[in-house]
C-alpha cells in the first residue's frame, strides 16, 4: 500500500526522508509528502504524482528541521490529489499524521469531529486521526495517540509528528501494515520496509501488531496499545545495500530478472545435498509432523498463487497427498475444510499481504498447522506461522514480482521433494533425478537469460498487440498464468492464460491473426498434447510464439517464433521456462514506454483486503 518513513537525528532530515521515500516508492506512487518540525512549527510539502513532483516542490520551497515524517501513497480513500496526499494536519496545524492502511470507521468519526467544529482539508480516512489526537492532546503525545488508537478500527501503521514534542516522533501499528525501526548512533529511522533504512544502519527492530513506538534520537521505546512496555530483540539486516540499487540496469525489474540464477541458488543452498537429499530443518517442521499430514491446503495471491499452483502439482504427484489450492482472497469465504491433520501452506514474498494473512488466520483457527513461505524475515506471516520456509531472494523493488517467483518455485520443488522423501511416497531414484535437476536449475536459468537478445526484437514486433493468449499444461499452466500476468501488469496489454486443453472449450473464439498465442511447449510427457493445442491456434491464423527446447523439430513446424530454453526434467522446467516470458513482458513494456518498475494502479504489497 503506502510507504511511510520517519527520521530524528542530525542529518539533513528532508534528505533522509526523500531517500527513504525513493526506496519505498514501489509501495505506492499516487502522491507523496513530507513534514518536519522547524522552529516550533510543523512545515511540509506534498504533491500529487510521482516523487519527482515533490522533489521539484522542495527545490522551490526547501524545508529544514531535526525530525520529520514522509509518505508515498497508494490511494484508497480519496482520489490522488495534492490535498489527499499525506501528511495530514489537525486544525491547529501543530500535528502531522501519515498512515498506511485503512481506518474502517472513519465516516462516523469524521461526522462526529465535523459536528464538534473540526474543518477537514481532504477526503481521506487518515485525517480523522490528526483531529482526534488534537482533541486528546494535553501535553503527552503518547497518551493522546494511545487514547485515539482505542477508537479507530482497521489496519494501519501511523506516524505522528507534533510541534509541541519536537524531540520525539510516534508510530503505531495494527494489522498488516509493516513497520521497522532502524537504530543509529544518535539518530533513529522508521520505515514501512527495510530498504529505506539499510543504507544508514544494520540494526533493526520489527514492530508488531498492537504496538506503539516512541522514537527519539537515542532509540525507540516499544509498548502495547495499553501502555505495557515491550522488550524486542534487535535484529541484524543482512541484505546488501547494493540489492536496493539498479546496478547499471535500466530498471529494477530487469536487474531482478538477471538475479534469478543467484536467488534460486541461495534458496536451495544448504537444503539439498549432492545426493539430492533434502534438509528443511531450518523451516521448523519435523519429519514426524510431515508424516502425520493428511491433506495440504495452499493459498496465496497473484504471482505467489502461481508458485503455489506449481507446488500443488508437485506435492500431489510426488508426495501423493490431496492438495487444495485457493486464492487467499477467496479462502475464508469458501468454507475451507481444515483440521489438525491439515498442513496449510501460505506463500507470500512480503509476508504482509492482508488477504494471505487473513486466510492463514482462518486456517490456523480451523486447527491446521501453518507453514509460511516468505521472503521477509520477521514479516507478519513468519511470525504467525508454525514454521517458515524462507526464500532467499533479497529485496525486490520492481513492483512486478520476478525473482521472488522463481525463488518461491524453487522452494516449492524443495518442499515437495522433502515431503515425498520423508513420507516414502515416491521412488527414491525418481526423486534423485528430480533433485539433481533442481540443483542444476540455477545454471539453466542463467542459460535461459541468454535468449534475451532474441526476445527483444520479438517483443518489439508484438508491442502493438491488443490481446495475447498464453497456453500451458500441467506444471507449465501456472507459468502461462504468470507470463500473462507479467505482460498485462507492466505493458497494459490484455493477456489471458488458459490450460492449453481448455482453449477449445471457449477461448478459441478469440483467435485470429491479430491475437498472438504464447505456448509453453518444452519436452514433457504431455508435449504432444500441447503441440496439438498450438496447432489448433495456428489453424485460426494466430501467430505462435513457443517456449521450447533446442532441436525440437516438432515445435519448429508449428511455431512462428521460438524462445529457446535449456532442457531439464519436466517437473523442474517451469523454473527455467518462466524466464523468457518475464523478458518478453519487460521488453514489450519498455518498448511501449511504460513505467516498468511502477505500473499504474499497482502497489507491491497489498495490505488491505
Ligand atoms: C505480481 C505481484 C503480485 C503479488 C501479490 C502477492 O507481479 O507482484 O501479484 O504476487 O500481490 O504478494 P505477496 O507475495 O507479497 O503476498
Image (cartoon, rainbow, N blue to C red):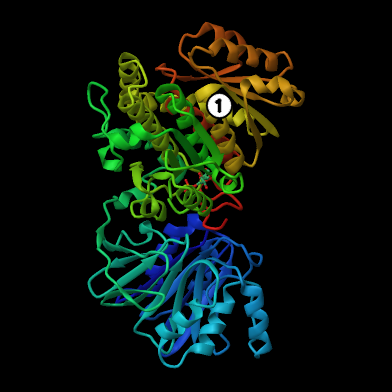
Residue 593 image offset from top left, x and y in percent: 59, 44
Residue plotted at (44% across, 73% down): 69
Q: Is residue 452 above or below residue 383?
A: above
Would you say 481 lies left or right of 210 here?
right
Task: Give the residue at mark 1.
Answer: 477
Q: Image quarter for residue 81?
A: bottom right
Left/right placement of residue 310 relative to residue 197 reads: right
Q: Is residue 67 above or below residue 289?
A: below
Residue sitting at 29 percent across and 35 percent down? Answer: 288
* Above or below 525: residue 605: below
Q: Position of residue 145 (x, y in %)?
A: 46, 81
Residue 83 makes an appearance in the image: no
Q: Residue at x 54, y 42 (%)?
A: 302
**Residue 414 picture quarter:** top left
In the picture provided, is 586 more to the left or to the right than 408?
right
Of residues 517 and 172, the one nearer the viewer is 172
Q: Secondary structure at mark 1?
A: helix
Can you name the residue that lies furthest to the right here? 509
Give the x, y percent position of residue 257: 43, 37
Amino acid at each position: 500500500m503506502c510507504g511511510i518513513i520517519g527520521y530524528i537525528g542530525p542529518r539533513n532530515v528532508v534528505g533522509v526522508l526523500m531517500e527513504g521515500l525513493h526506496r519505498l516508492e514501489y509501495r505506492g506512487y499516487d502522491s507523496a509528502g513530507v513534514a518536519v518540525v522547524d522552529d516550533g512549527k510543523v512545515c511540509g510539502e506534498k504533491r500529487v504524482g510521482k516523487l519527482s513532483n515533490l522533489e521539484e516542490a522542495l527545490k522551490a520551497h526547501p524545508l529544514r528541521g531535526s525530525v520529520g515524517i514522509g509518505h508515498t501513497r497508494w490511494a484508497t480513500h480519496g482520489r490522488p490529489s495534492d490535498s489527499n496526499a499525506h501528511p495530514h494536519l489537525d486544525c491547529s496545524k501543530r500535528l502531522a499524521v501519515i498512515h498506511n492502511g485503512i481506518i474502517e470507521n472513519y465516516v462516523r468519526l469524521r461526522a462526529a469531529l465535523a459536528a464538534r467544529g473540526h474543518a477537514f482539508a481532504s477526503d481521506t480516512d487518515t485525517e480523522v486521526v490528526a483531529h482526534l489526537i488534537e482533541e486528546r492532546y494535553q501535553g503527552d503525545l503518547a497518551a493522546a495517540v494511545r487514547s485515539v488508537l482505542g477508537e479507530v478500527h482497521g489496519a494501519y501503521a501511523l506516524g505522528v509528528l507534533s510541534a509541541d514534542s519536537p524531540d520525539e516522533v510516534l508510530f503505531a501499528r495494527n494489522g498488516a501494515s509493516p513497520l521497522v525501526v532502524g537504530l543509529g548512533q544518535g539518530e533513529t529511522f522508521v520505515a514501512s520496509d527495510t530498504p529505506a533504512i539499510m543504507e544508514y544502519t544494520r540494526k533493526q527492530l520489527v514492530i508488531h501488531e498492537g504496538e506503539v513506538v516512541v522514537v527519539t534520537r537515542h532509540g525507540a521505546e516499544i509498548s502495547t496499545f495499553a501502555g505495557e512496555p515491550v522488550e524486542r530483540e534487535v535484529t541484524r539486516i543482512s541484505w546488501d545495500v547494493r540489492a536496493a540499487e539498479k546496478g547499471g540496469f535500466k530498471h529494477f525489474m530487469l536487474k531482478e530478472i538477471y538475479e534469478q540464477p543467484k536467488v534460486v541458488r541461495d534458496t536451495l543452498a544448504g537444503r539439498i545435498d549432492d545426493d539430492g537429499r533434502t534438509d528443511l530443518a531450518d523451516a521448523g517442521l519435523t519429519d514426524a509432523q510431515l508424516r502425520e499430514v493428511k491433506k495440504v491446503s495452499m493459498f496465496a495471491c497473484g504471482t505467489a498463487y502461481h508458485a503455489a499452483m506449481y507446488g500443488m502439482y508437485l506435492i500431489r504427484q510426488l508426495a501423493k497427498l490431496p492438495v487444495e489450492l485457493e486464492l487467499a482472497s477467496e479462502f475464508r469465504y469458501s468454507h475451507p475444510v481444515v483440521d489438525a491433520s491439515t498442513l496449510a501452506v501460505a506463500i507470500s514474498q512480503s509476508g504482509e499481504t492482508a488477504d494471505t494473512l487473513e486466510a492463514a488466520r482462518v486456517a490456523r483457527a480451523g486447527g491446521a498447522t501453518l507453514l509460511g513461505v516468505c521472503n521477509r524475515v520477521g514479516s507478519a506471516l513468519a511470525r504467525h506461522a508454525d514454521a517458515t520456509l524462507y526464500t532467499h531472494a533479497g529485496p525486490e523493488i520492481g513492483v512486478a514480482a520476478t525473482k521472488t517467483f522463481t525463488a518461491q518455485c524453487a522452494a516449492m520443488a524443495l518442499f515437495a521433494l522433502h515431503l515425498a522423501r520423508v513420507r516414502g511416497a515416491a521412488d527414491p531414484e525418481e526423486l534423485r533425478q528430480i533433485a539433481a535437476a533442481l540443483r542444476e536449475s540455477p545454471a539453466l536459468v542463467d542459460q535461459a537469460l541468454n535468449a534475451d537478445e532474441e526476445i527483444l526484437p520479438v517483443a518489439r514486433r508484438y508491442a502493438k498487440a491488443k490481446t495475447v493468449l498464453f497456453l500451458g499444461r500441467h506444471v507449465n499452466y501456472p507459468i502461462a498464468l504468470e507470463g500473462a500476468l507479467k505482460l498485462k501488469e507492466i505493458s497494459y496489454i490484455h493477456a489471458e492464460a488458459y490450460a492449453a486443453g481448455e482453449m477449445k472449450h471457449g477461448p478459441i473464439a478469440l483467435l485470429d491473426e491479430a491475437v498472438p498465442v504464447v505456448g509453453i511447449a518444452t519436452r514433457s510427457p504431455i508435449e504432444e498434447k500441447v503441440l496439438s493445442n498450438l496447432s489448433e491456434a495456428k489453424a485460426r491464423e494466430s501467430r505462435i510464439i513457443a517456449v521450447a527446447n533446442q532441436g525440437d523439430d516438432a515445435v519448429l513446424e508449428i511455431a512462428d517464433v521460438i524462445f529457446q530454453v535449456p532442457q531439464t526434467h519436466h517437473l523442474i522446467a517451469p523454473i527455467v521456462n518462466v524466464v523468457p516470458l518475464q523478458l518478453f513482458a519487460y521488453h514489450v513494456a519498455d518498448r511501449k514506454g511504460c513505467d516498468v518498475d511502477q505500473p499504474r494502479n499497482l502497489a507491491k504489497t497489498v495490505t488491505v483486503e
